[in-house]
Image (tube, grey):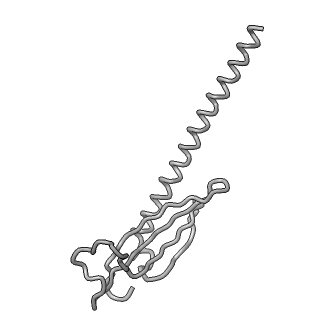
Amino acid sequence: MEVLVALTILAISLGLILEIFSGGLRRVNTGGNNFRAMLQAEALMNDLGHNLPLRQGIQQGSTDQGYDWKIEINPYEPEVGEPEVGDVDVASPLGELYDISVRVSWQTGLREQEVTLNSLRYILGEP
């Protein structure tokens, strides 16, 4: 009887330990996906105006690693109650201030996850 009780306690303990390790591995995998998506979003933001056209509108695509990306460039319009953007003229004859949003998404099982970066850029001339 004592052996049966000891084996039951051992089985329950091993089950809990395996659950803890598998949960940790899932969190590490999720953190790695978030990190890779953030790096991809930063690379896309840096490529604007170099390898990607810096123009108003929507651009989208996907990477070889399974990430989908979407870039939205719109004229900047401050929201009600939002603080001013310093001394930068939002619209001038030389250029305009634009709101840039880079979104990178990926599938994890049945869930879609995403990382979004936002920035303001003063674009000279017509983008």
Q: Quadrant for the C terminus, please.
A: bottom left
Q: Residue at x 24, y 79 (%)?
A: 88
- Taking the view exactly as shown, the residue that stands out farthest to the bottom is 93
- Taking the view exactly as shown, the residue that stands out farthest to the left is 87
Q: Is residue 25 left or right of residue 10?
A: left
Q: Residue at x 26, y 82 (%)?
A: 89
Q: Residue at x 43, y 80 (%)?
A: 74
- Counting from the top left corner in percent of width and height, residue 47 is at 41, 70
- Counting from the top left corner in percent of width and height, residue 20 is at 59, 33
Q: Quadrant for the N terminus, please.
A: top right
User: Foreground: 43 or 90?
Assistant: 90
Quick check: 57 above or below 117?
Answer: below
In this figure, what is the number of numbered marks?
Answer: 0
- Taking the view exactly as shown, the residue that stands out farthest to the top is 2
Q: Is residue 44 left or right of residue 81?
A: right
Quick check: 126 above or below 118?
Answer: below
- Counting from the top left corner in percent of width and height, residue 111 is at 63, 57
Q: Residue at x 73, y 18 (%)?
A: 8
- Counting from the top left corner in percent of width and height, residue 96 is at 32, 84
User: Foreground: 54 or 78?
Assistant: 78
User: Foreground: 55 or 11?
Assistant: 11
